[in-house]
Image (cartoon, grey):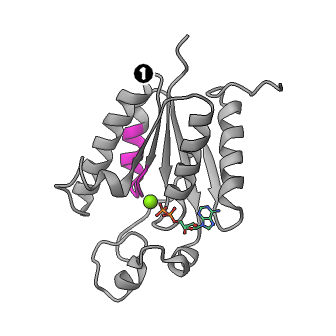
Amino acid sequence: VQETGFTLWFTGLSGSGKSTIANLLVKRFEEMGRYVELLDGDEVRLNLTKDLGFSKEDRDTNINRIAFVAKLLSRNGVIAITAAISPYSEARQRARGQIENFVEVYVSAPLKVCIDRDVKGLYAKALAGEIPNFTGVSDPYEVPTDAEIVVASHEQTPDESVEFILRRLAELELLRERVAA
Ligand SMILES: Nc1ncnc2c1ncn2[C@@H]1O[C@H](COP(=O)(O)OP(=O)(O)O)[C@@H](O)[C@H]1O
Ligand SMILES: [Mg+2]
């Protein structure tokens, strides 16, 4: 029997922890013997959406393309994980509407925490006015109101977030409960 594919749609500010948690999940799913593909925002923007910038229109197109690929993967039994900021709720809704098993994961962390982490040094530049349209600083982030899963990355470790997400997926009956050996 083919396993049920689904899409884990991460959303959250830059530096909130999407890529960190998504990469840990990839390992876990591989250990379970599942096919899994990560569509990470930064990597996607280097190839699939290399032609796009950060206007609202381009951000929407970026999300539409990611959603299209995630749909194709997850309807074939693959676990598709997307990890792009996806700041606009309307674009997330559109993705939700076209993907069968769509699970939105909001990685919440206060802007202040993300600025303090400043993983890529981009907040410093954005706050200095050097990057226009930077989410959270000079561009909107619409907080999700209907995410299936919310993890607070300033209150738990990445591993704790991973365990929580796996438990929720079992509750949603997208992952089989692991049978004790
Ligand atoms: N609970 C947590 N979950 C995820 N990342 C965390 C957590 N606590 C601290 N971090 C750190 O926060 C940063 C998140 O960066 P990253 O995963 O690249 O964010 P994003 O992909 O959302 O831009 C990493 O340096 C990571 O080590
Ligand atoms: Mg990332």
From the image, tell me which residue sits under label 1: 76
Farthest bottom residue in view? 128
Residue that appears at 35% across and 28% down? 72
Left or right of residue 151, residue 141 in this image: left
**Near-viewer residue (136 or 4):** 4
Residue that appears at 54% across and 77% down? 117
**Near-viewer residue (143 or 66):** 66
Establish if 43 lies above or below 72: below
Left or right of residue 101, residue 73 in this image: left
Mark 1 closeness class: few <14, some 14–19, many ≥20 residues within 10 Å: some
The percent coordinates of residue 16 (x first, y second) are 53, 65
The percent coordinates of residue 18 (x first, y second) are 51, 56
Q: Amino acid at mark 1?
A: Asn
Which stretch is magenta? 83-95
Left or right of residue 16, residue 75 in this image: left
Left or right of residue 85, residue 147 in this image: right
Farthest right residue in view? 180
* Quadrant of res 136: bottom left
Asked if residue 4 lies in the magenta stretch, the reply is no
Name the quarter where the C terminus is drawn. top right
The percent coordinates of residue 14 (x first, y second) are 45, 66
Residue that appears at 51% across and 59% down? 143
The percent coordinates of residue 11 (x first, y second) are 48, 54
